[in-house]
Amino acid sequence: MTIVSGTRYAIMHELRGAPEPSFPEILARLAPCDLVLIEGYKREPIPKIEARRLEAQNREPLAPTDPHILAIAADHPVEETGLALFDLNDTIAIADFVERTTGLAKQPD
């Protein structure tokens, strides 16, 4: 499947039994870019924000055993962890954290 507009395009690729691409393979397909936001690959040694939801099937926290988790965003109160904590719906605060952590500057309007 392909989505095309006058300024960009996206292609959905079916694996058809092939193995899931590795994280480095996916990054190579996205380059060049300044920031990649990805859901999944949670065991990769990359900076992460852990999302916690009360209705998740597996609610076991990842942060205690993953030193790459820099913050937690949750839809419920979280005990103090020493990490940055965000309400899961506070997208502005989370985006500001990502900006500060990556060193990327906001573009003027």
Image (cartoon, grey):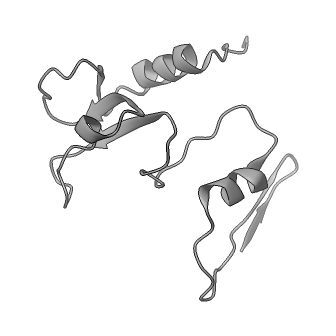
**Extreme residue toward the right, this view:** 6
108 in relation to 10, above or below: above
Viewer-proximal residue among 18 and 45: 45
Q: Quadrant of residue 68?
A: top left
Instruction: Describe residue 6's horizontal placement relative to residue 16 as left or right.
Output: right
Instruction: Describe residue 4's horizontal placement relative to residue 78 as left or right.
Output: right
98 in relation to 51, above or below: above
Which residue is drawn at the image coordinates 70% and 50% (left, top)? 27
Which residue is drawn at the image coordinates 29% and 21% (left, top)? 83
Q: Which quadrant would the C terminus be assigned to in this image? A: top right
Q: Which quadrant would the N terminus be assigned to in this image? A: bottom right
74 in relation to 100, above or below: below
Which residue is drawn at the image coordinates 63% and 15% (left, top)? 103
Q: Quadrant of residue 36?
A: top right
Residue 21 location, x and y as percent? 63, 68
Q: Quadrant of residue 88?
A: top left
34 in relation to 29, above or below: above
Residue 46 location, x and y as percent? 52, 39
Viewer-proximal residue among 92 and 98: 98
Viewer-proximal residue among 81 and 66: 66
Residue 29 location, x and y as percent? 77, 56
Residue 41 location, x and y as percent? 48, 54
Which residue is drawn at the image coordinates 27% and 44% (left, top)? 62
Viewer-proximal residue among 51 and 64: 64
The number of numbered discs placed on residues in the rendered structure image is: 0
